[in-house]
């Protein structure tokens, strides 16, 4: 579509939208590394690691703004350890990934002659197991 001035362009440049959380301070576009939360009842500002997800009552701050943070007179600032280095996968992340890969491989094993049909007790040998679907098991009622 064209206007009198030429082709229409988006009013918002595409580089504005980013999956990376940015600093909450006005005109600061740096990536956030810490989350600031105010505890009004205790007159305390708590600065800690970046929260799992953005919340309306918290403020995400870049490393520069988190280092320069000051609180109002009479307030205490509690600084929790913030890792400003690049995020690395934890042992739990790697284990979860390995388990997901193993789980994805299981249906192929069953289709090629595994013993998890009804009445066979499944791969673990549990006589109550009737069938499986992914990581879920269907068990017989203990009454039957």
Image: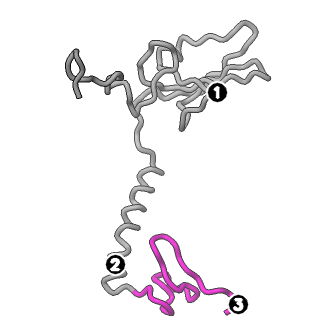
Q: Earlier in the sequence, mark 2 or mark 1?
A: 1
Determine if the magenta segment contains residue 128. yes
Q: Which residue matches tag 1? A: 57
Q: Which residue matches tag 2? A: 109
Q: Secondary structure at mark 1?
A: loop
Q: Tell me if label 2 and label 3 are in contact, CB under 8 Å.
A: no
Per the picture, the main secondary structure of the magenta-coloured stretch is: loop
Task: Look at 48% across and 29% down and name the residue there.
Answer: 83
Image quadrant containing the N terminus: top left
Residue 81 coordinates in the image, percent (x, y)? 56, 27
Distance between the Cα atoms at labels 1 and 3? 51 Å
Residue 102 coordinates in the image, percent (x, y)? 38, 66
Residue 85 coordinates in the image, percent (x, y)? 42, 28
Task: Look at 32% across and 76% down and name the residue there.
Answer: 108
Q: Secondary structure at mark 3?
A: loop
Find residue 79 and report its image quarter. top right
């Amino acid at each position: 579509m064209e206007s009198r001035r030429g082709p229409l362009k988006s009013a918002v440049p595409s580089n504005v939208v980013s999956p990376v959380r940015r600093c909450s301070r006005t005109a600061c576009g740096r990536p956030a590394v810490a989350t600031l939360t105010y505890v009004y009842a205790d007159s305390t500002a708590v600065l800690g690691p970046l929260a799992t997800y953005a919340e309306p009552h918290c403020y995400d701050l870049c490393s520069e703004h988190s280092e320069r943070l000051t609180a109002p007179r009479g307030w205490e600032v509690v600084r929790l350890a913030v890792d400003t280095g690049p995020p690395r996968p934890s042992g739990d992340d790697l284990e979860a990934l390995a388990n997901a890969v193993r789980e994805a491989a299981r249906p192929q094993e069953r289709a090629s002659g595994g013993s998890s049909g009804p009445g066979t007790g499944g791969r673990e040998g549990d006589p109550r197991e009737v069938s499986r679907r992914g990581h879920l098991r269907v068990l017989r009622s203990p009454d039957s």
